[in-house]
Each structure stands twice: as structure tokens, then as C-alpha cells.
Amino acid sequence: MIAFAVGMVLFALTVLFYVNRRTFKPLDRLVGKMSGAFKPVHPEHESMRRVIGLGYLETVFDQMFVDREQLEKQVRDSKPVLKWRIILDMLSGYRTEYASVRHHLEFTGIRLFSERFVVCTAEIGKEGGVSPKDETLYTYALCNVAEELMNMENSGAAVNLGAGFAAIVFSFAEGDMDQNHLRALAVLDLVLDVMKRQFGLQVTIGVGRCYQDMKDIPLSYEESQKALQYKMVIGSHSVISIEDLLGHDNQDYYRLIKMTDRIVEALKQTENGKLEGYISELFIEAVNGSLSPDLIRQLSYELIMKSLQVVASVGINTEETLEEMGNLHQRIIQCDNWQDAQRIVKTVLEGLAGKIEGKRSQRGSNKTIDRLLPYIQDHYRDSEFSLELLSEKFQLNPTYASKLFKEYTEKNFIDYLIEIRINASKELLAVKNRKINDIAEWVGYTNTRSYLRAFKKYTGMTPTEYREWVLMSEAKSASE
């Protein structure tokens, strides 16, 4: 009996051993795989893995939880970068469909509706300047303030563009385009107030139009950047809407804008006589074209803007120049009639011409340039005339000649050559019966299409339109 009992115990132990092996074999394989996939955090865990086997599973799961927490932290830390990338993709037109970007927006916490977008470009500044380190912090603060204010009733996001600039994107759940544009302007006024009061910052914001679809966000962004440029005229710490600048569609207005090119050219050459005459003609044309008071003011802004760009290209500090002139925006807004606006523009441009003359007198003359310019004037009608031929004639390196030309004429050689040819063709167009093709060939164009394209770019009119305008002006002058 004792022998039988001992035999049964041994048999039971044997059966238990084999059952245990078959039951836990898959689990042992899992432990082995996971033990190989996860490296032990501590050296003693290596021996533990070999000795304990199944007990090592707890250590593996602990490591998995630690890795999960680290992964979650990495995801949280990367959200601002992902948000920045998504907004920039929208601004550049890379992402145009709301449905395709919706889950990305939700993941990064960006609140945007599917339509009705307004894009703004903001620039920060401070009296005395802002250091690069503070610039980043202030721009970050601006983005936070903008998001907090616009998400109170609407939705939107703001990101740092670098160099003290930020992009602000509004979206609206309802309302028409004009209504939503006004809503955005109201919120931005609050942003300016908060940034001035809490941080002592001057924030200037350009605002684009409101568009229905996400695919049009790049258009609104481009308009906001153009509006921001008017900080030079309107002043800093202001909200500048593209709609206020452009007004309604008016073909006469855009034709007059092109007429400002010759005023700018006279300013470049500091030809005060022509400058005064061209300004007078511009405003008379504006009045005869029944341009609205707002558009006449806007025309003044555009002309001053172009003139300031000329001043900047010469190397004159435009900010100091504007400070000397006072608040131009306010002065033009307060004009009761177009004559007042004309007097302001004339005074400003004559002052700029004086600064350009002063800058050039400091620079002095250059004997090489003094020889090049007359030669160009005598040979621009040669269709093969080029910088290479000019350099070869005067035994100059083309790169050096180009640099010298830019330094002393403030324009590239090719631009200078085109302007000479276009200006020469203007004189010929005053002759009514002269053919356009003959004029193009006479001033150096073998291809009439190239001449038409260049003329349209530089004057805003076709040669035929320009001829009609000149003849009409002459007829008016004769009748008077």
C-alpha cells in the first residue's frame, strides 16, 4: 500500500509537470520574446530574466508603462511644432481641404471652423528696439493673447513667423464676409490694447479680406502682408485693413496708380520741375475721373509708399524720415479737399528729393559711370546691346560693371536699359501716324510682343492706350 501510494504521488507529480509545461509554454514564449525586445533597465534584471522567467513579465510591463509616459510627453512637446507646421501649410496653400486637415487640427488643439477665414500678419515693436530673445517671447505672448481673445466668440489660431512677425488666422461659424471682417477688426483692436497695456509693445497688424473657403487662405494672407506695408505711411500700433486701402474696384484708380511710376522716376532723378508737373497732372486726372475722396487719399498713400521705397533703395533711413514728417496718415485723412492732399504729397516728395540729392553728393561721382551712361544713351537702339557688350567696350569685368552700375544708378543695368527704351518710345507715340511695330524696332526691340509687354508693365497701359491718352491731354490743353 505504501509503495502504491508513493507511486501515485510520483505519477501525479509527473502529470502536473507535463500539464504545466503545455499550459504555460505559449506564455513562456511570450516572455522570451518580450525579454529580447526590451532591454533591461538595470543589470540585475538580466540575471533575473534568465532565472525567474515568468516573473520577468512584470518588469517588462513596468518598462512598457514608462515608455508610454515618455512617448506621451514627446507628443505633448511636439504639438506646438505640429501646429506651426499645419498653419504654415495652410498659409502657403499646401493644405486646401478642411476635411483632409480636420483630424490634424483636433490633435494639435487648433480650433477652426470649416469656412469663413480672415488672415492677419502682425509685427511687434518697441521704443528703443527689441532684442532677439525678447522678440521671441513677445511674439509668443502676442499669439497667446490673440488666440484667447478670438476664441472667446469665434475660432482661430496664431503662430510665430520669426523676426517679430506672427500670422493670425480667424474662422467664423456664421455671418457674411463684411460682418466677419468687422468682427476680426474689433478683436484685433483689443489685441493692440492688451499688448500696449501689459507689455508696452507697439503692434501693427495687416488684415486681409474674408474668404469662404480654406483654399483662399493664401490670398487673404498675401493681402494682409500688403496691408502691413502701409505701416510706413499710416504708422505703427494700428490695424490696417486691405479693404480700407484698396476701396472699391475702379479702373481709373488703377490707371492713375500706374501714372505714379513717372513721378517716382522723376524723384529718382531728383528732377524737381518734372516732379511738380507730374504730381499736378496726377491729381487733375484723379479729379477729372471723378475719383472719390477716399480713393484720392489712397492714391496719396500709394504715391508716398512708392517714394519711400525709392528713398530706402538709396540707403536713407525711412523711419527717421517719417518721424521728421510727422503723422502723414492723420494729415492726409484730415484733408478737406484734393488740393490739400496734393500740397502734402508735393511737400513730402520734394523733401525726399532733397535727401536723395544729399545722399548722392556724399557718395560723389564715378568717372567710369560718367562714361558708361552717355554711351548707353547713344546705343540703346541696338537690339543686341547688353551688359556684356558694354563691359567689353570699356574693358570691364561684367560682374564689376553690374555692381558699379547698381551702386551709382540704384537700378540694374537691364532695368535701366528698358526704362530708356520705354521713355524713348513714349516720345515717338505722340506722333499719331507712326506704327507701333516701327516704334518698337526703332527703340531696340526685334520682337513687338516683348515691347508691348514691357510697355504695359512700366506704364500700366498699352502703347495704343498711351497714345490716345497723350493726344486727348493735348487736345484738352489746346481747348483751354
Image (cartoon, grey):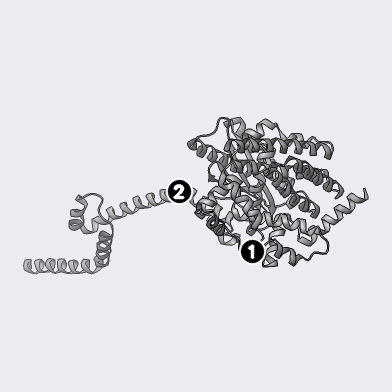
SS for tag 2? helix
Quarter placement of the N terminus: bottom left
Closer-to-camera residue (95/431): 431
Residue 12, compared with residue 128, is above or below; it is below
**In the picture provided, is 423 more to the left or to the right than 191?**
right
Residue 21, compared with residue 251, is above or below; it is below
Q: How far apart are marks 2 and 1 (CA)?
A: 63 Å
- Please give the name of the residue rendered at 85% of the width and 56% of the height, measured from the top-left corner: 471
User: Would you name the residue on which mark 1 appears?
Assistant: 383
**In the picture provided, is 473 more to the left or to the right than 37?**
right
For residue 305, say whether it is visible.
Answer: no
Q: Position of residue 166 (x, y in %)?
A: 57, 44
Closer-to-camera residue (214/202): 202
Residue 320, compared with residue 291, is above or below; it is above
Please identify the residue farthest to the right as the structure is shown.
479
Q: Do the residues labelled 2 and 1 touch (CB within 8 Å)?
A: no
Marks 2, 1: nearer the viewer: 1
Q: Quadrant of residue 10?
A: bottom left
Number of the label disc, if any, that sits on residue 76: 2
- Please give the name of the residue rendered at 58% of the width and 41% of the height, measured from the top-left corner: 365
Amino acid under disc 2: Arg
Closer-to-camera residue (298/214): 298
- Disc 2 or 1, which lies upstream in sequence? 2
SS for tag 1? loop
Q: Position of residue 124 (x, y in %)?
A: 58, 38
